[in-house]
Image (tube, helix red, strand yellow):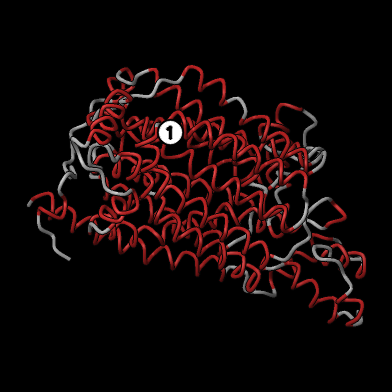
Amino acid sequence: MSDSKDAYAGNDLREVKQLGMWASIASLSYIFWIVGGMELVERIAYYGVKASAGLYAKAPVSEGGLGISLNDYGIIIALWALMQTFVPVFTGGISDRVGYKETIFVSTLIKISGYLVMAFFPNFYGFLFGAILLAGGTGIFKPGIQGTLVLSTGRQNTSMAWGIFYQVVNIGGFLGPLVAVHMRQLSWDNVFYACAAIISFNFLFLLAYKEPGKEERLERNRKIKSGEIQQQALWRDALHELKKPVVIYYMLVFAGFWFLFNSLFDVLPIHIAEWVDTSVIVTSLFGPEGTSNGFFQFWLGLDNTGTKVMPEGMLNLNAGMIMTTCFLVAALTAKYRITTAMLGGCLLSIFAFVLIGATNAAWMIVLAIAMFSFGEMMISPKKNEFMGNIAPEGKKAMYLGFVMLPQGIGWTLEGYFGPKLYEMYASKEIFSLELLSQRGMSAADVSAIPQGEAFSTLVTYTGEPAQELTTLLYNTHNIGMAWYIIAAIGTISAVGIYLYGKWLLKLQRA
């Protein structure tokens, strides 16, 4: 592939000196905060479902869950990922041409229908179709929001703008799982109804929304209609930009990180539910009796008895850290080259996964999630800043759609293989069935156990305490291997990011 200047016609590869933290914040316009609010609402609803999807899938039908295998869950996640991440590659260009307000409105309607399908049809195909609708709606929603952000900020305040936007987004990411924790303890369909109601608030934000650059877009469309300027077919235009080496290499090197990233949300809640005794955390904070205080039960994601942290509550440390400290990390990383900051973030995330594989101690899992969160803050806002900066004029949303391509590759592969890896090396369900056979249960009785009820059957059959049986199963299987394999995939990505950064620096100097 040629690295000539012609290959990057229209792209701006400069690194622009950023304003200071307070000057950047003061320079942000009202439309920036409007789209931040819209993304916050959308994320509350989205993560209400996403954070608990694996738990819903493996919960037995007798408890209102889907009662499906992790292999089937992997099929749903892979198709969800494929839809959500590849749709923006084309809808980004549509947003640039049709208008951001219009695409945001349509996407909200589609997402509401996705949540309602999940509620009305509590089976494999119902959840799969609901997930595809939700994914398609999200794929249409994102480019319009992010394109607005790029057009409402300048090159000199993009680091802080993306950092603060990511922080605001994670307030939604923090609240969504807490809604799910308490709704699912009533019944699973309540989760989906609540999320459909929450995202409806975006129609109110749309009333106050004014599209930046609308006059320029309408003028460009007028010139196209009159024949003053020629416009390529959208797919041809997108393909032309995608063929540029700066986009292709970006796509390849970051795919591994997104495999890593999505494992945290798709697989870790299941791992915590099965192997981590989170009552240790509650005992450390409140004593052996736990807490009946409703404030702590809600904000810490505790169960209704106040004696253990629910898996979504554990994972919520991630969003909690981001929503309180991301602007500080953004200010720190603004002093470094974008690819240098992203490499540091990738390495921190890899170490976190190694720690998850090494121990099931509750406080160590908390430390691992904290490490991952710092890594995510260093890498995730930067990917949008990078693509928004290098995008040619009139193609901002298109390029922000391209951001989803490496995520699409990584998440689709993780969606399919992540649960498979977990089932292979760490499935409590399978290990319980094996131990029941070893303890004398007949093969016919073992095969008759409903999906998701193997461990509870083991506890009843043996009469041994659940925690003792969990420790026995954990110690007799190499459960950490699944997490070490995921960390190894991330390591390949880290090497790629390092080489990409060096190559980009050479281009900038040229």
Whether residue 329 can be seen here: no
> Residue 344, percent across and down?
33, 51
x and y percentages locating residue 77 in the rendered image: 59, 58
Write down the residue under mark 1.
145
Q: Is the residue 364 above or below the residue 335 in the image? A: below
- Name, please, the residue furthest toward the left: 510
| Residue at 81 percent of width and 74 percent of height | 433
Q: Is residue 401 left or right of residue 49?
A: left
The residue drawn where x is 60% and y is 25% is: 201
Q: Is residue 66 left or right of residue 156?
A: right
The quadrant where residue 75 appears: bottom right
Secondary structure of residue under mark 1: helix
Quarter of the figure with the N terminus: bottom left
Q: Is residue 289 above or below residue 217?
A: below
Image side of residue 138 versus residue 9, left or right: right
Q: Nearer the viewer, residue 460 or 258?
A: 258
Residue 378 as seen in the image, left or right of residue 267: left
- Taking the spot 21% from the left edge, 37% from the top edge, the residue there is 227
Residue at left 52%, top 42%?
Answer: 138
Q: Position of residue 337 (x, y in %)?
A: 23, 45
> Measured along the vertical axis of the image, is residue 428 above or below residue 332?
below
Question: Can residue 284 be seen by looking at this rendering?
Answer: yes
Observer-nearest of 25 and 101:
101
Mark 1 crowdedness (10 Å alpha carbons): few <14, some 14-19, many ≥20: many
To which quarter of the image does residue 151 belong? top left
Which kind of residue does numbered mark 1 sit on? Ile
Place of residue 472 in the rendered image (x, y in percent of width and height, measured from the top left): 75, 70
